[in-house]
């Protein structure tokens, strides 16, 4: 019960405000991603969103206080993602001093191999899908041509239709 005694309305209001601002950021990010997809933009929606937010803040169309709490909270929590690599660098500093260049080279080579492998697989998949789509279109075109030829033949020979 002592925990609940320390919670006051100011803390609750602050938490709700942070949650609303983070939800606003998420909604804005989703909206910008949707815009990027709709416009077939090569620029990711997150970059578009950051640019729009920067312009809105610079032109003072959006007040800084409307994003300040969430941005402080997000930046503070962002450090959690960087703590493990920093601890690893500190803990294995001697190893990095001796083999740092080799490790970095190995990571770059591995990343390059993964990117090239992914690009190759995606390229083959797109070619396969394109080939299947062309085959499907050719079959549909042949079926339409056959159907239209049969209907035109029946329409041009009414005497043959009556004889049958």
Image (cartoon, helix red, strand yellow):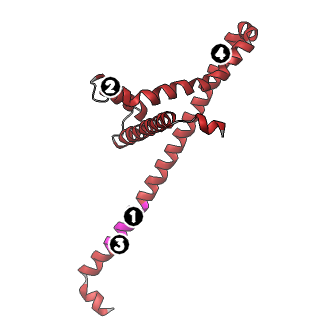
Q: Residues within 10 Å of mark 1 (few under 14, many from 20)?
A: few
Above or below: residue 51 compared with residue 25: above
- Disc 4 versus disc 3: nearer the observer: 4
Q: Residues within 10 Å of mark 2 (few under 14, many from 20)?
A: some
Above or below: residue 162 compared with residue 39: below
Give me the C-alpha separation between circle 1 and circle 4. Answer: 57 Å
- Disc 4 versus disc 2: nearer the observer: 2
Q: Quadrant of residue 42?
A: top left
Q: Which residue is mark 3?
A: 147
Q: Residues within 10 Å of mark 4 (few under 14, many from 20)?
A: few
Give me the C-alpha separation between circle 4 and circle 3. Answer: 64 Å
Q: Which residue is mark 2?
A: 57
Q: Nearer the viewer, residue 120 or 45?
A: 45
Left or right: 106 in relation to 35: right
- Disc 3 versus disc 2: nearer the observer: 2
Residue at 62 percent of width and 27 percent of height: 113
Can you give x and y, in whole percent of width and height, for residue 47 in the image?
A: 40, 29
**Number of numbered discs on residues:** 4
Badge 1 or badge 3: first in the primary sequence: 1
């Amino acid at each position: 019960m002592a925990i609940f005694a320390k919670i006051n309305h100011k803390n609750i209001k602050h938490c709700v405000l942070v949650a609303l601002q983070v939800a606003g950021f998420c909604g804005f990010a989703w909206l910008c991603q949707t815009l990027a997809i709709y416009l077939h933009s090569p620029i990711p929606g997150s970059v578009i969103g950051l640019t729009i937010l920067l312009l809105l803040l610079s032109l003072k169309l959006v007040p800084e206080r409307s994003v300040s709490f969430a941005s402080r909270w997000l930046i503070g929590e962002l450090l959690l993602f960087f703590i493990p690599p920093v601890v690893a660098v500190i803990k294995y500093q001697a190893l990095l001093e001796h083999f740092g260049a080799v490790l970095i080279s190995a990571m770059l080579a591995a990343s390059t191999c993964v990117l090239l492998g992914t690009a190759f697989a995606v390229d083959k998949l797109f070619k396969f899908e394109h080939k299947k789509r062309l085959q499907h279109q050719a079959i549909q075109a042949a079926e339409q041509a056959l159907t239209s030829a049969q209907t035109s033949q029946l329409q041009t020979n009414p005497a043959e239709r009556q004889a049958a």
